[in-house]
Image (cartoon, rainbow, N blue to C red):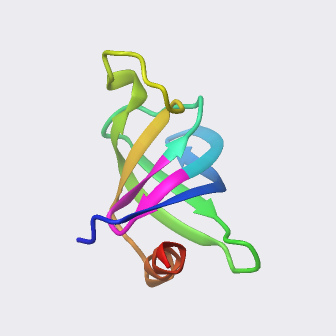
Amino acid sequence: MNSSRARTSIPVEFQAGTNRGTGKINNMGSGGLFIGTGTIPDQGEPVSLRFNLPGESPIAVTGLVWWTTRDVERPRSGPQGFGLRLLDASEAYEQAVERLLV
């Protein structure tokens, strides 16, 4: 797995169970991404999300909440949110990451 992360500010919509939320993808890489949001699902919860890169078709992926800012004991300087480990990194997602890393 590529450990490089692309810093982004891409609007995203997500669903975790019956809860829906919005936020921004703050960074993304081959295996997952971090979503900055005040609507934080529980660790281990499955999440589906959808986002667009400007001028491109929507990309949908699913993953598991791997960690949240609620799990951090000391105050963070960054945004609230959660890290998502992808279960199905589609070819469209991988291509988007590659374009953002250039």
Q: Is residue 102 above or below residue 63?
A: below
Q: Which residue is painted at 39% across and 44% down in the image?
A: 83
Furthest toward the left, the residue is 1
Horizontal side of 84 relative to 77 (left or right) equals left
- The question of residue 41 being in magenta is answered with no
Answer above or below: position of 23 versus 94.
above
Camera-nearest residue between 1 and 46: 1
Q: Nearer the viewer, residue 15 or 5?
A: 5
Q: Measuring 39% from the left and 50% from the top, which residue is drawn there?
A: 84
Please tell me in which quadrant of the rendered image residue 52 appears: bottom right
Up/down of 13 relative to 93, above or below: above
Q: Tell me which corner region of the image, top left, top right, bottom left or bottom right, holds residue 57.
A: bottom right
Q: Per the image, is 32 magenta?
A: yes
Query: Percent position (x, y) of residue 47?
Result: 46, 49
Q: Position of residue 101 (x, y in %)?
A: 47, 73
Residue 30: x, y in percent?
35, 69
| Outermost residue toward the top in this view | 74
Q: Which of 101 and 10 is in front in this view?
A: 101
Which residue does the image show at 76% across and 79% down from the upper left? 55
35 sits to left or right of 24: left
Q: In the displayed structure, would residue 12 be above or below residue 22?
A: below
Q: What segment is highlighted magenta in the picture? A: 26-34
The number of discs equals 0
In which quadrant is the N terminus drawn? bottom left
The chief SS type of the magenta part is strand
Camera-nearest residue between 53 and 62: 53
Q: Position of residue 49 (x, y in %)?
A: 55, 57
